[in-house]
């Protein structure tokens, strides 16, 4: 005898004025920084003694992140007695996720096993993070009858709209992103389309894109191609068939300049194969506006005279990693999770994006009479962590805050 399907939960409005006023007060108490606001109000520059701190014009929480956090806090208030689970991380910041855990919100795997989903009960609440979640995962949770709080960013959903359109028109979505990233996996699941017969291919960088371009031009080996992209394409993907018509999309937090380069490479490959025609190529600009603003602001900050750059944020944050990539091309750049990484005036604990691990480096803080420190942060970093980092720099320099 089959198990009856639980009834769908009644839709609940979390964003009532009363709930949101309480949420805003709590969120501000956890993440706001009066010091950061003061520096911003002073043109983004602060001097204490012989130490100058310069902030990028745009950094930290974006609207999508703020909305996701607000909804998670609201869920706790609206459902005070219910078990609340979060798929993975609300955003890529360990301090924010730890705060949610302290509020009694438990963490499921971003891609939960069947046993984890089967353990959910109809009275449970499940939060979908800002990156979104895969179609099958959301469907399985709905089938359990759970109340779903969807915090998916609007920019991410715009990408989903484009890849669904590709699937409906038998166009393969070539997604610039990290194949294992939650957002890219969620986007790839939408690229299959409503019937599940669409196709996608994920490319990480220009090196992988060059291999795709070679294949489009008829220079590739199918077995070598499928081996290279074994975990980055749709089931049944055949490059001979599914690279005939392509549409470029992207993980919204990738580096814009790289996405544009990839788009240009693929467009030219299609034109070379199709006698100059680009009819079988399409492209939509789906880079997140906040990601671009933070990248542009960092380029502006790097025009200033700086001795070093601190980038504050979660190590698994894609948009924060790209800020590090930009900074380290010009000056010593240190990727830190929070102020606790500034161990001393000699030692710093930081994330090496090339080795992909946290390391300790000595001699990071120049012993100069007048020192200028640039600071930026990814879209998932709250201002209180930036304040803590500024205060620690001043402490190590022997300055009063």
Image: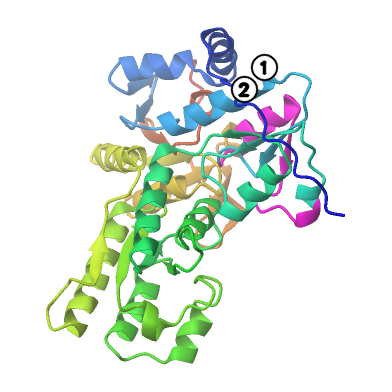
Image: 394 above or below 349: above
Q: CA distance from mark 1 to mark 2?
A: 7 Å
Q: Which residue is mark 2?
A: 73
Q: Which residue is mark 1?
A: 77
Image: 158 above or below 275: above
Residue 144 x, y percent position in the rendering: 74, 43
Residue 71 x, y percent position in the rendering: 56, 26
Badge 1, how many Cα within 10 Å: few under 14, some, many 20+?
Answer: some
Of 30 and 74, the residue lying toward us: 74
Helix, strand or loop at label 1? It is helix
Q: Residues in magenta? A: 92-115
Q: Quadrant of residue 41?
A: top left
Instruction: Residue at 72% x, 38% y: name it.
Output: 145
Quadrant that contains the N terminus: bottom right
Instruction: Residue at 62% x, 22% y: name it.
Output: 73
- In the rendered image, residue 97 lying in the magenta stretch gets the answer yes
Helix, strand or loop at label 2? It is helix
Q: Are marks 1 and 2 in contact (CB under 8 Å)?
A: yes
Image: 163 above or below 208: above
């Amino acid at each position: 005898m089959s198990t009856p399907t639980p009834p769908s939960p009644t839709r609940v409005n979390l964003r009532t004025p009363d709930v949101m006023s309480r949420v805003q007060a709590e969120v501000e108490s956890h993440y706001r920084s009066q010091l950061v606001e003061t520096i911003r109000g002073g043109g983004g520059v602060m001097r204490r003694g012989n130490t100058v701190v310069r902030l990028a014009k745009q950094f930290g929480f974006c609207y999508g992140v703020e909305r996701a956090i607000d909804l998670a806090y609201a869920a706790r208030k609206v459902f005070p007695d219910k078990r609340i689970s979060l798929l993975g991380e609300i955003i890529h910041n360990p301090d924010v996720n730890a705060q949610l855990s302290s509020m009694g919100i438990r963490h499921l795997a971003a891609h939960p096993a069947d046993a984890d989903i089967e353990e959910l009960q109809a009275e449970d609440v499940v939060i979908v993070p800002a990156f979104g979640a895969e179609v099958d995962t959301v469907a399985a949770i709905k089938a359990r009858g759970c109340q779903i709080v969807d915090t998916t960013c609007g920019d991410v959903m715009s990408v989903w709209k484009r890849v669904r359109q590709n699937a409906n028109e038998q166009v393969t979505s070539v997604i610039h992103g990290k194949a294992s990233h939650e957002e890219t996996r969620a986007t790839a699941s939408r690229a299959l389309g409503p019937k599940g017969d669409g196709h996608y291919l994920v490319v990480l960088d220009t090196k992988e894109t060059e291999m795709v371009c070679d294949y489009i031009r008829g220079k590739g080996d199918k077995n070598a191609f499928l081996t290279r992209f074994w975990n980055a394409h749709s089931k049944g993907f055949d490059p001979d068939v599914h690279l005939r018509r392509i549409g470029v999309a992207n993980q919204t937090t990738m580096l814009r300049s790289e996405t544009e380069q990839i788009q240009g490479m693929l467009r030219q490959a299609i034109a070379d194969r199709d006698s100059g025609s680009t009819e079988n190529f399409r492209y939509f600009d789906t880079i997140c506006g906040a990601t671009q603003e933070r990248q542009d602001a960092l380029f502006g900050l790097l025009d200033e005279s700086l001795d070093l750059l601190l980038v504050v944020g979660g190590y698994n944050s894609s948009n924060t990693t790209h800020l590090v990539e930009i900074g380290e091309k010009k000056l010593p750049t240190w990727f830190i999770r929070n102020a606790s990484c500034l161990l001393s005036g000699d030692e710093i604990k930081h994330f090496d994006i090339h080795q992909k691990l946290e390391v300790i480096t000595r001699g990071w803080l120049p012993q100069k009479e007048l020192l200028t420190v640039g600071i930026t942060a990814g879209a998932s970093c709250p201002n209180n962590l930036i304040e803590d980092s500024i205060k620690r720099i001043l402490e190590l320099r022997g300055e009063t805050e």
